[in-house]
Image (spheres, rainbow, N blue to C red):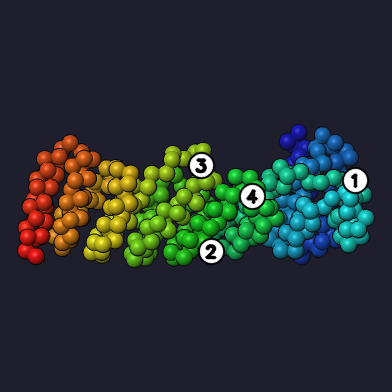
Amino acid sequence: VKAMEDLFVQLTRRAEGKKPRLSPREWSEVLQDVFELRRFIPVVSVHLCLEIFCESLLSSEVDENINLVRDIFDYKPADALFKATKSATLYVLSVHKIGNVPLASKEKIVSKTCEYYLDSSKDVDDTHLELAKRCLGLMPEAASEHLRAYRDMLTALDMLAEFGVSILPIVVRHMTHYVPLVQKILHVDPTAYKSARKIIRMIKLLGGLERSKRPPLDEAPILFAVAEYALKALDFDYCLSICDLMMEKPSREACQVSLRLINSQDFADHAAKVRLTSFCVNYCDERDIEDMLMQRINWVDEAGTAAGTY
């Protein structure tokens, strides 16, 4: 059966690559050819014929063809008499008594086209990505989880573009660890550490397409990378806010960031140091426990002394 399907794919792909590009009427002739071919190969279903045809239309990089697919998606047999007189393609559908395109077929068509545009894009601001958004616009936003994941991916790529990062979208799509991507963002724009929540949101949006192949997102290594840049910038207040965020889900990285902030000579918030040291005492590695206890005693004494001077 696969070999038979390939004949239909070859037919529509040749039409897709024609120069000059085919007009809507010429595409209707291609659809007629598809149905004529099916007369000799009935093992290929009508819906599969339409899927192959619509995928070629959407992959042709022509707005007019995306609108043509919208007409096919919206077509209903009851509208045949009215709409078929205005569209040669819909006329072919009516002649061959084609019913509604099933929702599952629509989702499959749009999903395959989004994958094509995503994987053929050369950067996060490639015009192919705008075409992918146009294709997604053919489906309601409440469509399948897989299509929502494509929407999220495209939103995340827009966010990467805002950060000034240049990277192949196909590389981003197949990432399983995001710390190198975060480091790339921070290398391009060292002030991006101030956008920690935006970075986390972006990464959550990126993870939907390959969710089943990825471990659950661990935010700690990402926030650790962000906090390091805050410390380099001597932005202790922002680093403290990252520590507070990380302490909500205790981790080795949360302890490491807290330790670095505690040991920063120019960080003078004694109350915060006591709080951070208390956290580390409870969650740090055993080998650090003695040092942490000494840190806590020292900072409690300093905080008390500072308070007594007022």
- Alpha carbon of mark 2 to alpha carbon of mark 4: how far? 25 Å
Closer to us: mark 2 or mark 1?
A: 1
Where is mark 1, residue-wise?
Answer: 97
Three-letter code for the amino acid on which mark 4 is drawn? Ala
| Amino acid type, label 1 | Lys
Q: Look at the numbered discs 2 and 1 and tell me whether their residues touch, using CB distance below 8 Å.
A: no
Q: Tell me, yes or no, if residue 17 can be seen here.
A: no
Residue labelled with disc 3: 211
- The secondary element bearing badge 2 is classed as loop
Q: CA distance from mark 2 to mark 1?
A: 42 Å
Image depth: mark 4 or mark 3 in front: 4
Q: Going 20% across and 53% down the picture, which residue do you hit? A: 260
* Residue type of the residue flagged with mark 2: Asp
Label 4 packing within 10 angstroms: few (<14), some (14-19), many (20+) = few
Q: Which residue is labeled 2 in the image?
A: 125
Residue 142 image label: 4
Badge 3 or badge 1: first in the primary sequence: 1
